[in-house]
Image: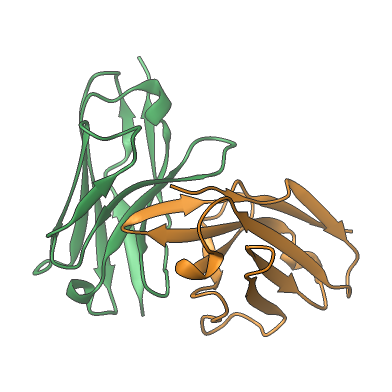
Chain colours: A green, B orange
Amino acid sequence: QVQLVESGGGVVQPGRSLRLSCAASGFAFSAYAMHWVRQAPGKGLEWVAFISFDASQKYFADSVRGRFTISRDNSETTLYLQMESLRPEDTAIYYCVREVAPIWGQGTLVTVSS
Amino acid sequence: NFMLTQPHSVSESPGKTVIISCTRSSGSIASNYVQWYQQRPGSAPTTVIYEDNQRPSGVPDRFSGSIDSTSNSASLTISGLKTEDEAAYYCQSFHSGYGIFGGGTKLTVL
């Protein structure tokens, strides 16, 4: 069935890096734009980053621009989020989301703490 | 970029109908599709409406979406409320690759 499965979350110290992955299955991944969305504890949803179907276009929220990178491997049907210089305020559940007829993964928790 | 404004909370009784609004601050509500997401406590969001008024398979027809250019807003209507509908609901639009979310509305069914 159509599915997105995130992985790579964990506890990391401020200033360190982390890479999240999102494995897609059940649909033509290479034809869809994708997003990362996060949710801090007890807060609402916050859009983080976008990548077009062919990776030619990438956009970022102001809060992460210059620190986060989005990429994809269409041959492996996987989406990535490389997070650098992490801050405590980056603590959140991170979701990958298909743009058209949106589907969501179950999320992966990132905790930035010393 | 524009903002999407939702009421913080709404409540209604089982069996009744509730409408949750989502008002766009600038630009036309019709310029970009609106999606609606349901999030139950402790769970990931799921899509209940996409492209203004489309229902994903598996979402009951008690859920419907619409847009109103006069008020520049989108609405999620849930009829025949059930206790299982109690959740947070978020509206959202994509604009030139950027994603914009409303602040969310907590629906209480009591």
Picture quadrant of residue A55 = bottom left
Q: Residue at x 12, y 60 (%)?
A: A56
How many marks on residues? 0
On screen, B11 above or below A39?
below
Residue B55 vs A65, above or below: the answer is below
Rendered view: A41 above or below B83:
above
Residue B6 shows up from this direction: yes
Q: Residue at x 88, y 69 (%)?
A: B14
Residue B37 in the figure: left or right of residue B32: right
Q: Position of residue B52 (x, y in %)?
A: 55, 74
Observer able to see residue A105: no
Residue lying at the far left of the rendered structure: A75
In the picture, measured across the screen, residue B82 lies left or right of residue A21, that is right
Task: Say whether residue A20 is left or right of residue A40.
Answer: left
Q: Residue B13 placed where, x, y %?
A: 91, 65
**Image quarter of the C terminus of chain A:** top left
Along the line of sight, which residue is nearer the eye, A97 or A107? A97
Q: Quadrant of the N terminus of chain A?
A: bottom left
x, y percentage for residue A79?
21, 57
Q: Residue at x 22, y 31 (%)?
A: A67
The residue nearer to you, when weighing A95 against B11, is B11
Residue at 35% x, 32% y is A63
Q: Residue furthest top?
A: A114
Task: Pinpoint residue B93: horizontal percent, then vertical percent.
Answer: 47, 60
Residue B52 lies, with reference to residue A81, above or below; the image says below
